[in-house]
Image (cartoon, coloured by chain):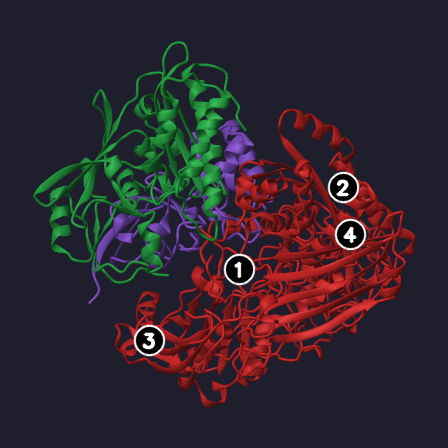
């Protein structure tokens, strides 16, 4: 299990990187390498050129833009884990990041890499979907923003072109005191989740839900917003019955299936985890004791 | 003709300059170019954690990096943990005293992982230790001796600090 | 005199090297001029090979040679791996050829071998070997494989039955006719592989000047490798040396001799350069033997008090495409079933199915976890149906201690009648129940249920034949420096032989373990050996060290008596010195060792043979049977199917303990593998027998958060079979684990009346059962 032969490039700027991307027909961008390197070692991918973007320095920022946190594409998962800004402004991401692999993989793994790989149960894309993130991609001579809703095109396939690279992710911030919860089910700690649920709630004084975001990972081909469930929450006051009923809508999602987890089980988990996430997020929003919905 | 580069990597304080194929993994570089064979390779797909090294002080899987990516970087491996040839580091001593290893193959990755973890969390709970080593597979010990060693080492390190 | 070493919790001598990165595993060897090999393996579970074209591979950078079957020396082309353990029950003992050139029968079977300057270049070239296949249907599931119309595993066969046999005793028909209660159930029990973190590895070097072939292999059994190399390749025994250096875990699959261990030496000799082959993890999933599926169709008969009257049934065992170790695993399964119980009648028919998968050979536990699963589930069912407590029905059936030794009425794999040598089964179960607070469990369960938590408890017993013969020897030698060196044949893959064998020896000379070296796993160091498997080293090598140490002790006294002009009966040894009791007269062992080196022209003192050393090959008269009881408490989340093991208690009787520290570690590690068998580890194949779960991301090993601490208590029933009273301890933890864990899960889910008849049990299976029960 050794990587196949390729030509290695380590550009120092995004311009150089995208120039190479446009030149080379069969190139792979190497970000944190936590997904690409195993695929290279197993020769599942056979690129002629590997463009290592780890030496590009100006892609590793986390910036507070007021209404959003802005992440450079090469921000490491470990940087997110230890970022005070992230825990303060996007607590959902902080809660999710601890489930991303292990410390040793978070050292290298990047936000942009995770978005580009787009595993349907990966935590960062799920959080990005929940927060309505905007992904900036650049190619030679052009840049564009892709709303998260339009970002996944299919199973592990983002909607940017082969000559484009993710440079930045802009993650809108929810109002202070919002409710959040990231709940996932994996066979072992640190594994890719079979299914996950990310919930954000804005709750008015008095307990009325004013805004809700519900995303499930690992059910569809990419993280999915459960709009039917979100709609059912608007204007309602949180309760165990309500959350149980709303979460049931997750069973209607068209689910994928493999030998490890049948479709019905993914749907079932989506309902269970969403029920739990809703209770947790709501409790946090109303500063109440945690509602325990097993 | 293969794509090659000359790189310079500092491992345990010693600088190794070698011309290598750009596709060479960092684990193979450490083991077969620098002949520091204490770092082990168990899966080459980033799951088992045997190849864990400290890259600029942070744990990383050396099978998931290319050697060229470590050019100019500082690496610490299992050979660089003990204070000298005669003594063991308190973490290593705790492993011996708590039967934290059997075949010794996963041990280097366990040690590097715990070295970083105990610096950040000097007084961990058992659960925290178990999560900290969740990315390192051991097939011999059932982890019980390793977890005991880590908790014991935390005490020793605190007492020594 | 120093502290007694035998029986003490001595930290391991092995550790400092391994903790500082100074171990030497096979891949750590870098020999001058060494080449690296990569295999071309079949990507298909079953295919005919029409042609192989190696020209592009040969032209690749760095490639030195490419071998196919046709490129091997003529005498090797059709040679198969020697059949290790024949048995008349085997009708189709297929064995693997070195390189297959006609019909591949499992995905991963080696077809060609590329040798190059680097592994990277060898792997590149391996992808350039072009093979023209006719893909054939594969026999996948072992049960279906025995049905009419199933695809043939080997196209030359007319059926897939590799072996068939019946074991049993007593009048089963009568027992069932008279039974108060009968219960019939089918079980599916899957076990995966050993999955040592170090994969297999072979380095071979041929020295033309000495005409000597040296093989380093990550094997548990260097002497078996040597024997097979000699048999297969026709080399002289004294021209082959096999060394098992540090080995990164074994667990069974590294016991067996593999084609790679034959090919790499052949090629090293052919090319005149050292050759290294390091199995990678993908190859390990495809081509290293494992255990797999067994289907049991079983029936139990008990009387109104829950006393066993009989057990009967049929079992189907998946053996894969080849049978290198014959029917060892399923035979052990069949003979393990009666366990610690007075079982008056028993009959099991076993059919061994050939499937297009890698061979099945023993993995830690070796067929026993499956049998224990079947038997313990049957006991649970009988208890439930009679309204008896599950521990109570077991208690009523345990063999009373006073009936030891207990003849079972079966023949074990060593060909000897199965006679349990010693053990206190009632005490062992009682101890396990005590440390698990079994009596307090129903109250805990009630409290938990009131909180909406679902906890359950499970109990399982087992008896395991350990310490198999024929022998494992030891040479004990006191060197002129005074250090003691022990040589023994079995390799060490983490068991701590250095420490434990030193403990056996140390007290004889009143020295510390640090004064003793152990050189193991090297055919150049001792004349004969077998290997480290079947929980046999403490029993065999331990006893040999004991006997050889005694002999060396006697000799040292004899020589020292001569040197000090004293009577032998007045002498003793302490702190490494032979002394005359009640006097200041003494001589260090180093001087005694020097004295028996001899001096030119003088006779040896006391007329002894030269050298302060002795060699013994202890051969046990039969296996010694260890036993144990596992009690497991779990919490199940019925919504997600997650199982959390809350408490794991085990009472373990492996006879006398040499080092309880090391034995605890063996039990804990073995339990972890049992946890994997119960909940995580599943080697999945598609309908055509192609492997699906061939990475560590898909085949799940237990990691630290999923693995429980094991509360181990030892019951020590010394065996009369060997002078130390020891029994094997390496596998007991694994054997009852799945049975106890699954029983506990079932108990936790009793509100849904769930019945579980298989393992592993995945979260989705649990949720499905809860829902169908609801």
User: What color was chain A assigned in the picture?
Assistant: green
Q: Are marks 2 and 1 in contact (CB under 8 Å)?
A: no
Q: Which residue is mark 4?
A: C656
Q: CA distance from mark 3 to mark 1?
A: 34 Å
Q: Residue at coordinates 53% horizontally, 49% vertically from top-left?
A: B138
Q: Which residue is mark 3?
A: C129
Q: Is residue A293 above or below residue C525?
A: above
| Left or right of residue A5: residue C375 | right
Q: Chain C, which colour?
A: red
Judging from the image, what is the letter of the chain drawn in purple? B
From the top left corner, tell me how far across and down residue C24 is, in percent.
Answer: 48, 59
Q: Chain of mark 4?
A: C
* For marks 4 and 3 on the same chain, the one whose residue lies earlier in the sequence: 3
> Which of these two is toward me, C502 or A116?
A116
Location of mark 1 (residue): C246
Residue C7 visible in rendering: yes
User: On the image, numbered disc 2 is attached to which residue?
Assistant: C432
Labels 4, 3: front one: 3
């Amino acid at each position: 299990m050794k990587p196949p032969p390729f030509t290695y490039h380590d550009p120092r700027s995004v311009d150089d990187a995208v120039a190479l991307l446009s030149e080379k027909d069969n190139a792979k961008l190497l970000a944190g390498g936590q997904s690409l390197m195993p695929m290279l070692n197993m020769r599942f991918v056979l690129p002629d050129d590997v463009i290592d973007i780890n030496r590009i320095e100006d892609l590793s920022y986390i910036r507070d833009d007021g209404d959003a946190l802005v992440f450079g594409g090469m921000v490491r998962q470990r940087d997110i884990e230890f970022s005070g800004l992230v825990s303060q402004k996007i607590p959902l991401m902080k809660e999710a990041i601890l489930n991303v692999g292990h410390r040793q993989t978070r050292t290298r793994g990047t936000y942009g890499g995770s978005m580009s790989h787009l595993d349907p149960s990966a935590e960062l894309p799920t959080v990005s979907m929940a927060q309505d993130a905007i992904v900036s991609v650049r190619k030679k001579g052009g840049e564009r923003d892709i709303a998260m809703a339009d970002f996944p095109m299919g199973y592990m396939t983002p909607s940017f072109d082969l000559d484009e690279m993710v440079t930045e992710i802009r993650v809108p911030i929810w109002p202070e005191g919002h409710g959040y919860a990231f709940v996932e089910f994996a066979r072992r700690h640190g594994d890719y989740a079979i299914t996950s649920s990310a919930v954000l709630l804005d709750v008015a004084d008095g307990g009325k839900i004013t805004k809700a975001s519900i995303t499930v990972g690992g059910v569809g081909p990419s993280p999915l917003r459960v709009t039917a469930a979100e709609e059912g929450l608007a204007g309602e006051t949180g309760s165990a019955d309500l959350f149980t009923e709303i979460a049931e809508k997750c069973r209607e999602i068209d689910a994928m299936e493999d030998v490890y987890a049948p479709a019905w089980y993914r749907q079932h988990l989506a309902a269970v985890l969403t029920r739990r996430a809703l209770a947790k997020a709501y409790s946090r929003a109303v500063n109440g004791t945690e509602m325990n919905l097993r | 003709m293969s794509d090659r580069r000359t790189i310079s990597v500092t491992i345990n304080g010693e600088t190794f300059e070698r011309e290598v194929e750009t596709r060479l993994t960092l684990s193979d570089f450490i083991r077969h170019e620098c002949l520091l064979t204490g770092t082990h390779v168990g899966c080459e797909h980033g799951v088992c954690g045997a190849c864990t090294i400290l890259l600029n002080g942070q744990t990383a899987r050396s099978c998931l990096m290319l050697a060229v990516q470590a050019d100019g970087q500082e690496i610490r491996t299992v050979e660089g943990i003990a204070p000298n040839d005669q003594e063991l580091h308190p973490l290593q001593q705790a492993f011996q005293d708590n039967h934290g290893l059997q075949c010794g193959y996963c041990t280097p990755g366990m040690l590097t992982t715990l070295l970083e973890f105990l610096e950040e969390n000097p007084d961990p709970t058992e659960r925290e230790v178990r999560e900290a080593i969740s990315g390192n597979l051991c097939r011999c010990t059932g982890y019980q001796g390793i977890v005991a060693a880590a908790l014991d080492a935390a005490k020793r390190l605190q007492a020594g600090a | 005199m120093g502290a007694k070493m035998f029986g003490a919790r001595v930290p391991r001598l092995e550790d400092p090297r391994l903790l500082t990165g100074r171990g030497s595993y096979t891949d750590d060897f870098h020999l001058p001029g060494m080449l690296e090999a990569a295999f071309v393996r079949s990507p298909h579970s079953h295919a005919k090979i029409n042609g192989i074209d190696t020209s592009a591979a040969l032209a690749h950078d760095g490639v030195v040679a490419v071998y196919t079957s046709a490129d091997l020396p003529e005498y090797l082309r059709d040679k198969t791996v020697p059949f290790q353990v024949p048995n008349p029950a085997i009708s189709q003992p297929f064995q693997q050829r070195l390189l297959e050139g006609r019909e591949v029968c499992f995905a991963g079977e080696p077809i060609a071998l590329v040798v190059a300057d680097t592994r990277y270049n060898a792997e590149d070239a391996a992808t350039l070997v072009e093979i023209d296949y006719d893909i054939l249907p594969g026999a996948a599931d072992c049960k279906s494989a025995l049905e009419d119309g199933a695809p043939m595993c080997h196209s030359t066969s007319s059926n897939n039955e590799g072996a068939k046999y019946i074991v049993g005793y007593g009048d089963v028909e009568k027992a069932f006719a008279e039974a108060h209660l009968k219960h019939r159930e089918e079980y599916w029990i899957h076990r995966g592989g050993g999955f040592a973190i170090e994969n297999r590895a072979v380095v071979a070097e041929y020295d033309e000047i000495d005409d000597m072939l040296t093989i380093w292999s990550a094997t548990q059994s260097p002497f078996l490798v040597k024997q097979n190399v000699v048999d297969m390749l026709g080399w002289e025994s004294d021209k082959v040396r096999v060394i098992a250096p540090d080995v990164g875990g074994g667990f069974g699959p590294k016991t067996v001799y593999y084609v790679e261990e034959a090919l790499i030496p052949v090629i090293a000799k052919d090319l005149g350069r050292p050759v290294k082959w390091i199995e990678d993890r993908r190859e390990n999933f495809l081509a290293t033997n494992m255990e797999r599926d067994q289907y049991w169709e079983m029936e139990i008969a008990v009387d109104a008090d829950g006393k066993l009257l009989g057990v009967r049934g049929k079992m189907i065992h998946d053996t894969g495409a080849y049978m290198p170790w014959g029917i060892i695993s399923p035979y052990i399964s069949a003979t393990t079933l009666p366990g610690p119980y007075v079982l008056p009648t028993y009959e099991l028919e076993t059919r061994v199915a050939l499937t297009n998968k890698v061979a099945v050979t023993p993995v830690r536990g070796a067929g026993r976890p499956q049998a224990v699963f079947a038997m313990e589930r049957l006991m649970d069912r009988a208890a439930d149906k009679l309204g008896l407590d599950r521990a109570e029905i077991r208690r009523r059936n345990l063999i009373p201690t006073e009936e030891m030794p207990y003849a079972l009425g079966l023949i074990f794999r060593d060909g000897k009648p199965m006679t349990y040598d010693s053990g206190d089964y009632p005490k062992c179960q009682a101890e396990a129940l005590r440390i698990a607070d079994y009596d307090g469990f129903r109250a805990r369960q009630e409290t938990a249920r009131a909180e909406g938590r679902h906890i359950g408890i499970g109990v399982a017993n087992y008896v395991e034949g350990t310490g198999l013969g024929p022998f494992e020897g030891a040479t004990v030698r006191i060197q002129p420096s005074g250090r003691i060196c022990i040589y023994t044949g079995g390799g060490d893959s983490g068991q701590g032989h250095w420490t434990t064998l030193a403990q056996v020896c140390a007290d004889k000379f009143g020295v510390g373990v640090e004064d003793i070296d152990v050189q193991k796993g090297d055919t150049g160091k001792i004349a004969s050996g077998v290997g480290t498997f079947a929980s046999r080293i403490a029993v065999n090598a331990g006893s040999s060290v004991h006997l050889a140490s005694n002999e060396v002790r006697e000799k040292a006294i004899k020589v020292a008596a001569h040197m000090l002009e004293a009577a032998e009966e007045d002498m003793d040894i302490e702190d490494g010195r032979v002394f005359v009791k009640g006097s200041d007269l003494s001589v260090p062992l180093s001087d005694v060792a020097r004295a028996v080196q001899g001096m030119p022209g003088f006779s040896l003192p006391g007329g002894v043979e030269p050298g302060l050393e002795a060699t013994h090959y202890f051969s046990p008269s039969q296996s010694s049977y260890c036993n144990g009881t596992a009690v497991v408490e779990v919490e199940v989340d019925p919504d997600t199917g997650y199982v959390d093991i809350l408490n794991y208690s085990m009472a373990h009787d492996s006879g006398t303990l040499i080092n309880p520290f090391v034995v605890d570690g063996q039990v804990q590690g073995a339990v972890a593998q049992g946890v994997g068998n119960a909940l995580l580890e599943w080697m999945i194949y598609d309908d055509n027998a192609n492997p699906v779960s061939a990475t560590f991301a898909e085949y799940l090993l237990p990691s630290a958060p999923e693995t429980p601490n094991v509360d181990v208590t030892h019951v020590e029933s010394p065996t009369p079979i060997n002078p130390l009273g020891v029994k094997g301890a390496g596998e007991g933890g694994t054997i009852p684990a799945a049975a106890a864990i699954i029983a506990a899960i079932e108990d936790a889910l009793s509100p849904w009346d769930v019945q579980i008849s298989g393992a592993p049990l995945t979260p989705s299976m649990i949720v499905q059962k809860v829902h169908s029960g609801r």
